Structures are given as C-alpha cells and as structure tokens.
Image: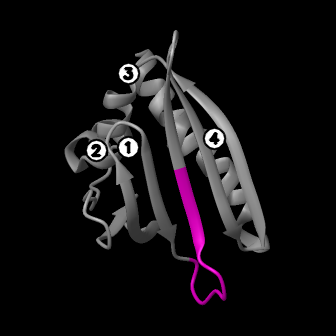
Amino acid sequence: MKDFKKYYTLPAAPEEVYLALTVPSTIYLWTGEEAEMSTVPGSDFSLWEGSIVGKNLEFEEGKRIVQQWYFGEQDEPSIVTIKLHQVKEGTSIELKHTNIPDEDYEDIAEGWNSSYFGALQDFYND
C-alpha cells in the first residue's frame, strides 16, 4: 500500500472549488461525465461512469472533503482527504490519498494530476 500527497492551486475561491467537487451538475461541467455525489456523510458516490466509487465520510463546506475509495477487498480503507485553503491566486488544495494498492498507484497518481485536478485546472483556465 502506498500514499499519495500533492498540492494544487486553482484560480477560483475555495467555495467554488468545493461546489465543483460536490455538486453533480458542476462535476459534469468539468468531467463531461454523469456523477453521483452528495454531501451527506455515509452516502455513496460514483465518478467517471463508475471508474471511481466510494463512500463520503466528512464534509466541511468550502474547506474539506473526506472520502473512502473502494479498490476491492482491502484490510485498511483507502482514504482521500481534500483540504481547501484561500490563497492570493485562488485556492490551494492539499490532497492526501492513503492506502492505495501498489498495483493501482501509478494510475491513481496520474489520474489525480490529469483527469481530476488537471481537468479542473483546464476548466477554470478556459
């Protein structure tokens, strides 16, 4: 199991980024895919037509999202924590993804950089 931690900066306010990560219609705008998402702790979510599925654990509006991502049977859950901080340029995002199966690590790291936060950067920069 491996952990992935990275910082990203987006040219939008933390409240806007939070909505882009938690509202299905807004997720669709930057992914082009239908999404199942709710800010109710304990609710299931699905992104990219089921390529990413899991459970929403905690939300602090405009500041923090904590999710469990599913990778089949795992002894310890894979936890994603996204923290949003206001900076002069917009929002600094602290991403921490723990307990990624070794065989999935490269795909997950690339996905965070290109499909997830890369797509959000493209969305805000267009």
Q: Where is residue 80 in the image (x, y as percent from the top left)?
A: 55, 59
Q: Do the residues labelled 1 and 3 touch (CB within 8 Å)?
A: no
Residue 2: quadrant of the picture? bottom right
Measured in 3D between alpha carbons, the distance from the residue under mark 1 to the one under mark 3, in whole angstroms, is 19 Å
Which residue is labeled 4 in the image? 113
Instruction: Report the Cα–Cα distance between label 1 and label 2.
Output: 5 Å
Question: Can you name the residue that lies furthest to the front here?
Answer: 60
Looking at the rendered image, the disc whose residue lies closer to the viewer, 1 or 3, is 3
Which comes before the other along the chain, label 1 or label 3?
Answer: 3
Give, as a single range, the part of the protein colored magenta: 71-81
- The three-letter amino acid code for the residue at tag 3 is Ala
Q: Estimate how packed mark 3 is, as few (under 14), some (14 to 19) or many (20 or more) residues with alpha carbons within 10 Å.
A: some
- Which image quarter is the N terminus in? bottom right
Q: Position of residue 34 (x, y in %)?
A: 27, 55
Q: Is residue 12 left or right of residue 24?
A: right
What separation in Å lies between label 4 and label 3 (alpha carbons)? 20 Å
Q: Position of residue 15 (x, y in %)?
A: 32, 30
Residues at circles 2 and 4 in contact by the CB criterion of under 8 Å: no
Residue ID for mark 3: 13
Q: Residue 28 carries which label?
A: 2
Does 36 appear in magenta?
no
Give the CA distance from mark 1 to mark 4. 14 Å
What type is the residue that disc 1 sits on? Thr
Find out whether the residues at labels 1 and 2 contact each other: C-beta distance under 8 Å: yes
Q: Name the residue under label 1.
A: 31
- Foreground residue, 89 or 24? 89
Asked which secondary structure carries label 4, the reply is: helix
Up-down: is 72 above or below 87? below
Q: Badge 2: few (under 14), some or many (20 or more) residues near its Cα, within 10 Å?
A: some
